[in-house]
Image (cartoon, rainbow, N blue to C red):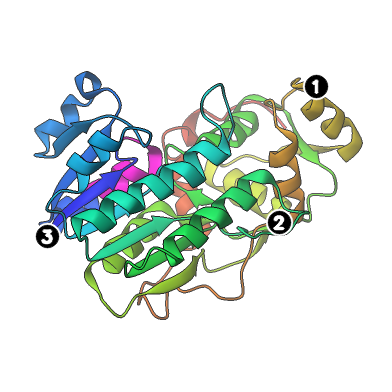
Amino acid sequence: MLIALTGATGYVGSRILRKLLRREHEVRALVRRPDRAGPLEDLGVQLVAGDLADKGALAALVAGAAAVVHLVGIIVESRGQTFEAVHVAGTQALLAAGRDAGVRVVVHMSALGARPAVSATRYYQTKWKAEEAVRASGIPHAILRPSLIAGPGNAALKTIVDMIRLSPVVPVIGNGRYELQPVWIEDVAEAFALAVERTDLRGTFDVAGPERLTYHQLLDRLETALGVRRRRVPVPVGIVRFAAAAGAALPNLAPITSDQLQMLLEGNTTDRNALETPFGVQPRPFALVAEEICAPYAARATVAS
């Protein structure tokens, strides 16, 4: 099957791309800089130069494709890359191209927590608008809403691992009782491949790990994988909120936006995890994922507690 793919060079997209190729699909990828995408060509991937604002590139991307896998998204806005432009307008443009080309299925990556509520962050609101565009497109579709996607290469988890490795104390925002449900990146890639291939997997699905973990429990798993224990220091939410609004970083804490802080504190879990049913994937426990993430560093985490 020829699959048109956006976001192929990203953290998640690169894993999904390799999963699709291993399952003997042909892949055509939209890339902004083909001169920097040589490794994709080496894998036999067809490259189309352009972005989601380029109608000609989108038409070339989807021409003759049976399926579209749409992964492009941003976490932080920048000049010319707003949530509305990327998540909403970009998705609408891709869907229009896919509809004109007669693609048979769209598999779209949303986010666990996407909703239209006024109280939701703009990230979640625009993810919801993109979902609504997919649902209204008239194209058979699967919308996947992953929780925190965990694995080597996740920048947020790498920052936490580095804090644990290199500092005798680890800051915890607030009480650390907010819950996450991290899902292994390979489980996410498997779910996307299955959604492309199986016509019974149509609709909107939450995709998460097998267990809810408080932030403290997540730190426990990472410390165990590194073979260390660190003292934890609570950082008042008000101080972090002020720093986020000012765009500043606190000691041992990377800069965090106000939206990211809100999403962290409200947690990210689901009671409707679709991985086991209907996808048939046994989700990997985070303790095992933590071992994989920490393996390159475990012997070097030597700062005394």
State the mark number for residue 291. Answer: none
Residue with the mark numbered 3 = 1
**Which mark is in front, 2 or 3?**
3
In the picture provided, is 246 more to the left or to the right than 165?
right
How many angstroms separate mark 3 from mark 1 (CA)? 48 Å
Q: Which secondary structure class fits the magenta region best?
A: helix
Q: Is residue 11 magenta?
A: yes
Task: Tell me whether circle 3 and circle 1 mark residues in contact (CB < 8 Å).
Answer: no
User: Could you say where residue 199 lies in the image, as x and y percent from the top left?
Assistant: 26, 77
> Which x, y percent locates residue 97?
28, 49
Instruction: Report which residue position mark 1 lands on.
Output: 246
Q: Amino acid at mark 2?
A: Gly
Q: Disc 1 marks which amino acid?
A: Ala
Image mark for residue 267 = 2
Residue drawn 22% across the image and 59% down it? 67
Work out how far the residue at label 2 is from the one at label 3, CA to CA, in angstroms. 38 Å
Quadrant location of the C terminus in the rendered image: top right
The residue at 62%/45% (across/down) is 123
- Counting every numbered tag in the picture gives 3
- x, y percent for residue 238: 91, 36
In the image, residue 75 above or below residue 181: above
Q: Is residue 236 visible?
A: no
Element carrying mark 1? helix
Q: In this picture, is 132 found above or below 94? A: below
Residue 114 shown left or right of residue 67 in the figure = right
As helix, strand or loop, the secondary structure at mark 3 comes to: loop
- Start-end of magenta stretch: 9-17
Crowding around mark 1 (Cα neighbors within 10 Å: few <14, some 14 to 19, many 20+) is few
